[in-house]
Structures are given as C-alpha cells and as structure tokens.
Image (cartoon, rainbow, N blue to C red):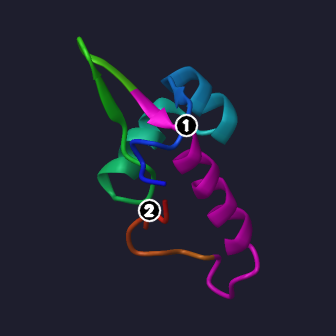
C-alpha cells in the first residue's frame, strides 16, 4: 500500500502538543533540527502532522530509553 492509498489522520498542532507533551517552540525547533516529523501544509496557511509519524516518533522515544546514550540520534528517520 502506498502512502497515498493508506488511511491516516491529520493532527493539528494542539493535538500534537497534547500527545507528545512538547511545547510549540520545541516542536518547531526539533523539526528544524530534523529530530521530529515535519508538518504537512494543507493549504491556506493550515498545517498538520501525520498521526502515523507522530506515533512512530513516540515509539522511537520509548525504544531510546533502552539505548546507552539515551537514544540521541542525528536526524529523525521517517520509517513509514
């Protein structure tokens, strides 16, 4: 199934902040550092995030607890 065929939910910023516990400035800073999923422009200045990418980021953070260096990575890798 290609990304265009798969069903996903778009999350707006307040929901991303709620789900991750991160503030708006932190989310945008981490996107700039390529350590957080990028936003998706929906048109008219509206942006959102792919729910699957946010969930994958959360899963990566949970797995990072088990890594010796705290799972600090150079760049967020999108596995979807």
Q: In this view, does 80 lie above or below 69?
A: above
The residue located at (43%, 59%) in the rendering is 35
Question: Which mark is nearer the camera, 2 or 1?
Answer: 1
Q: In this view, does 7 lie above or below 74?
A: above
Q: In which quarter of the image is residue 47?
A: top left
Q: Which mark is residue 64?
A: none
Q: Quadrant of residue 60?
A: bottom right
Q: Left of 58 or right of it: where is 25?
A: left
Depth check: give the residue in front, 40 or 5.
5
Q: Left of 23 or right of it: where is 36?
A: left
Q: Main secondary structure of the magenta part?
A: helix
Q: Distance between the residues labelled 2 and 1?
A: 17 Å
Magenta-drawn stretch contains 80: no
Q: Is residue 72 above or below residue 40?
A: below
Depth check: give the residue in front, 39 or 18.
39
Depth check: give the residue in front, 36 or 44.
44
**Residue, far bottom:** 68
What element does badge 1 sit on?
Answer: loop
The residue located at (73%, 64%) in the rendering is 62
Q: Mark 2 points at which residue?
A: 78
The residue located at (47%, 31%) in the rendering is 24
Q: Which mark is residue 7?
A: 1
Question: Magenta span covers which residues?
Answer: 48-70
Q: How crowded is mark 1: few (under 14 residues within 10 Å), some or many (20 or more)?
A: few
What element does badge 2 sit on?
Answer: loop
Give the percent coordinates (x, y) of residue 13: 50, 25
Give the percent coordinates (x, y) of residue 55: 64, 49
Dot placed on the residue nearer the N-terminal end, 2 or 1: 1
Q: Left of 77 or right of it: where is 66?
A: right
């Amino acid at each position: 199934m290609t990304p265009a065929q798969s069903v996903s939910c778009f999350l707006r910023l307040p929901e991303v902040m709620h789900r991750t516990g991160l503030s708006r400035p932190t989310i945008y800073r981490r996107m700039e550092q390529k350590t957080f999923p990028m936003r998706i422009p929906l048109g008219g200045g509206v942006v959102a995030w792919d729910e699957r990418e946010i969930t994958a980021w959360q899963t990566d953070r949970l797995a990072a607890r088990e890594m010796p260096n705290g799972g600090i990575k150079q760049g967020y890798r999108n596995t979807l």
